[in-house]
Image: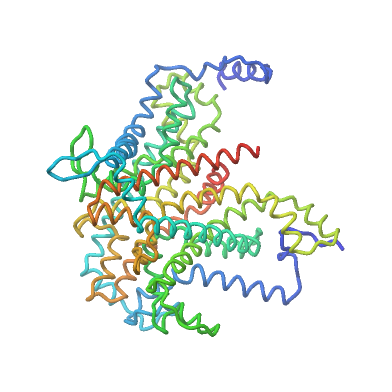
Amino acid sequence: MSKSALIERSRRSERLPSAPTRRRSGRRTGAFWVPWAFLAPALVLFLLFKFIPMGEAVMTSFQNVRPFLGNQWVGLQNYNALLSSDDFQGAVWHTLLLGVGQTVGSLLLGFTLALLLEGQAKRLWFVRSAAFLPVVAPMAVIAEVWRIIYHPTGDGIANQILSWIALEPSQWINSPDSSLVSVMLVGIWRGAPYDMIIIVAGLVSVDRSLYEASALDGAGPLRRILYVTLPALRPVIAILLTLAAIRGMRVFTEVFLLTNGGPNGSSEVVMTLIYKLGFERNQLGIAAAGSVLLFAATVALTLLIQLARRRKE
Amino acid sequence: MSTSFDSALGLGTNNKPWIKVINYFLWALIVIVFAGPLVAIIVGAFSATRDPSQLSLIPQNPSLENFSTALDRNVMLYLGNSLIVVGFGLLFQMLVSVFAAYALARKKFRGRGIAMLLVLATLMLPEEILAIPLSRVLSDVPFIGINLINSLAGMIVPVIAWGFSILVMTEFMKEVPMELEEAARIDGAGELRTFFSVILPTCTPALGVIGVFGFTMIWDQYLLPLIVASDSDMFTLPLALRSLRADPEVGLGVVLVGATLALLPSVIAFLCFQKSFMRGLASGAVKG
């Protein structure tokens, strides 16, 4: 151990917690540009591929994009066109339904799984790892396998399972009535194991003596979960809800690959609509307006959640 | 009564035989529901069945026929593209994250707060939100003026700087005791020497975390390759699955071969780095 380090350490232990001495200037050695040099690659890449595209999206959203003719400023026209279109209103509604359904479904199923699979035993660890595989599998792979499961004939796997419980076969992703629910089921299937792992980690910190105390008071398993487990998990659940809400707004790949918004726009979400406007219908200005609105919604939701969290503390 | 509760339901300590039977039944059900479809992909890749509605956990007519058809359909090219993207992408992503985290965690400097804020802001700017303008920016990169559309570089460069990875690394690096660095400096080591031979070696667990998360993130990319690749020569495996499925001459088996090749690396990465993965999940979730 070097001398200066020892001095530094003794100095630190002497300092009172309230003393506002900013004397740990050991950090401020070296030229001022050194930290910036270390940060430069990240910041330059962020500038090029995050901030400039965002700026461009804002600019484009006020313009009528005309290749070879030059762009035209149109004010809020793109936003008006987008907000008043039935497609967009439908897409927003579907995104909300899908987001809420997937979030709540994953959380409920994940919580159930966590209760069933909580513990240190090796076999529990094995079951948890196996159940976690959907989270790490690429979405494109998951979409392909679910397309097979959802095969719309009576031989399809999902339809066979329906027939076990004496239900009529469904068209799943191929019918406007069931497409959104079918996509939701896939999202829950993929989201639940993720929630499970986070909740299992949270369950470790629940005070075991409270379980025994509640058992002595004659509480059954259900009451134990309601009054001991759930309150202890509140912060974990809050975080899971936050992450899921923000992710849910920009859902794209699963919808694109399972239904591509169809049939008849019955499962169109905001991102698949923006993709179509931008890359298929070449309405870049309107698509950019959609991106800006999506970004604004993300920021608003993030800030709202932060605010709510802070108020609680 | 003195039953001890090691879990909310107390299943582990319950020794009634019927509870045990139900337990094992539920565990089997969970494994089949969540891992079953993925195992069925691999099994199906090795089976010669042509029924598009069936998936089976038990191999039927085992054969390698699907693989030889898949080779004719350029599946190896797509796999190669995916591996190049994830290889270079991950290498540069980890380097950039570690550099940035070093500055954010170990240095005090004017503007540190702003730099941190910029990194946090990028978390709200995922590919999905930027897709439309990003495709334009990639076709004519500002200041440099090169066109990255329809190139693997176009899929690599935008994923190199990743806010999540930088923030996770920053948190870990804050834990390294300051004395180490001061000792190195007194021994006359320069900035880069200190960084590579003192700080980095203490961060290997964190490198595992950002490595496995970065791998999963890049391997799962869909929208970015979708807007970058215009010829099928540039397709990554996930993109190729869709075109294989749409090809009427290609059977389900070949799609499953592609899916298997896309699935296995992520499963292997997860199983090998499971500890890092769980650790990252926990820290990420706690910090929100």
Position of the C terminus of chain B, as image quadrant, is top right
Q: Position of residue A132 (x, y in %)?
A: 51, 61
In the visual, does B262 lie left or right of A234?
left
In the visual, does A115 lie left or right of B74?
right
Displayed quadrant of residue A33: top left
User: Going 64% across and 51% down the picture, which residue do you hit?
Assistant: A202
Q: Position of residue A294 (x, y in %)?
A: 40, 47
Foreground: B118 or B151?
A: B118
Position of the N terminus of chain B, as image quadrant, is bottom right
User: Going 35% across and 52% down the picture, which residue do you hit?
Assistant: A84
Q: How is the image coloured?
A: rainbow
Q: Is residue A82 above or below residue A296?
A: below
In the visual, does B269 lie left or right of B287?
left
Foreground: A203 or A295?
A: A295
Residue that extends furthest to the left in the rendered view of this protein: A68
Q: Position of residue B53 (x, y in %)?
A: 38, 80
Q: How many marks?
A: 0
Displayed quadrant of residue A13: top right
Residue that extends furthest to the right in the rendered view of this protein: B1
In the visual, does B144 lie left or right of B49?
left
User: Going 68% across and 76% down the picture, which residue do you hit?
Assistant: B21
Q: Position of residue A110 (x, y in %)?
A: 58, 60
User: Going 62% across and 16% down the picture, which residue do you hit?
Assistant: A20
